[in-house]
Image (spheres, helix red, strand yellow):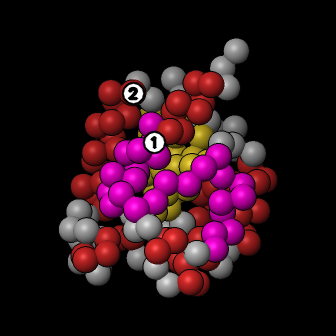
Amino acid sequence: MFRVQVIHGPNLNLLGLREPDIYGRQTLATIDAFLAAEAELLGIALDCFQSNSEGALVDCLQATFGHKDGILINPGAYTHTSVAIRDAIAAVGLPAVEVHLSNIHRRESFRHHSYIAAVAVGQICGFGADSYRLGLHALVHHLKSLQP
Ligand code: DQA
């Protein structure tokens, strides 16, 4: 059974209230609940973690080493700033899929660059909360492709 760590970065705890025109009206609790249901359908084990703190996100990433098989991450604004999160993903060496609710490429230019993309298997953005579901499927598909 694949073990997946879902990681949500800063301000994603405010989903539902935060700029709903951009991020939609679903709360993080709703997203975590549908990911849990999706995980059951896929037959995988899934844990979700959110923090506003870069160090806590790095700690969570480090803790995946030896305990998880893959990472689904929305690094929020740290996408565009954090070498530390990028290095933590590279350090643990697990397949990671980067997701964003909004299409970061059609927004402000400072959102166009992701420090995470180069260490991710791939990036899914622009589908609202469904980016997470699509990202989870992509990650599981990728993990299956790595099996002998
Ligand atoms: C986000 C996009 C980021 O640019 C932004 O800072 C976020 C959310 C998204 O899911 O669309 O906090 O990661």
Image quarter (top left, top right, bottom left or bottom right) of the C terminus: top right
Q: Is residue 134 magenta?
A: yes
How far apart are labels 2 and 1 at the CA level? 9 Å
Could you tell me if residue 50 is visible in this image? no
Residue 39 lies, with reference to residue 123, above or below; the image says above
- Considering depth in this image, is 110 or 6 the residue closer to the camera? 110
Kind of residue at disc 1: Leu
Image coordinates of residue 57 in percent, x first then y, are 59, 65
> Relative to residue 42, is residue 59 drawn left or right?
right
* Residues packed near mark 2 inside 10 Å, few (<14), some (14 to 19) or many (20 plus): some
Q: Amino acid at mark 2?
A: Leu
Look at the numbered disc 2 and say if its residue's Cβ is closer than 8 Å to ligand 1.
Answer: no
Q: Residues within 10 Å of mark 1 (few under 14, many from 20)?
A: many
Judged from the image, the secondary structure of the residue bearing numbered disc 1 is helix
Percent x, y for residue 63? 65, 50
Which one is in front, 50 or 110?
110
Sequence-wise, the earlier of marks 2 and 1 is 2
Badge 1 is on which residue? 136
Q: Residue furthest left?
A: 25
Question: Is residue 64 shown in magenta?
Answer: no
Image: magenta residue range: 113-137
- Residue 42 numbered tag: 2
Is residue 57 found left or right of 46 in the rendered image? right
Expressed as whole percent of the image width and height from the top left, the position of residue 88 reads: 72, 59
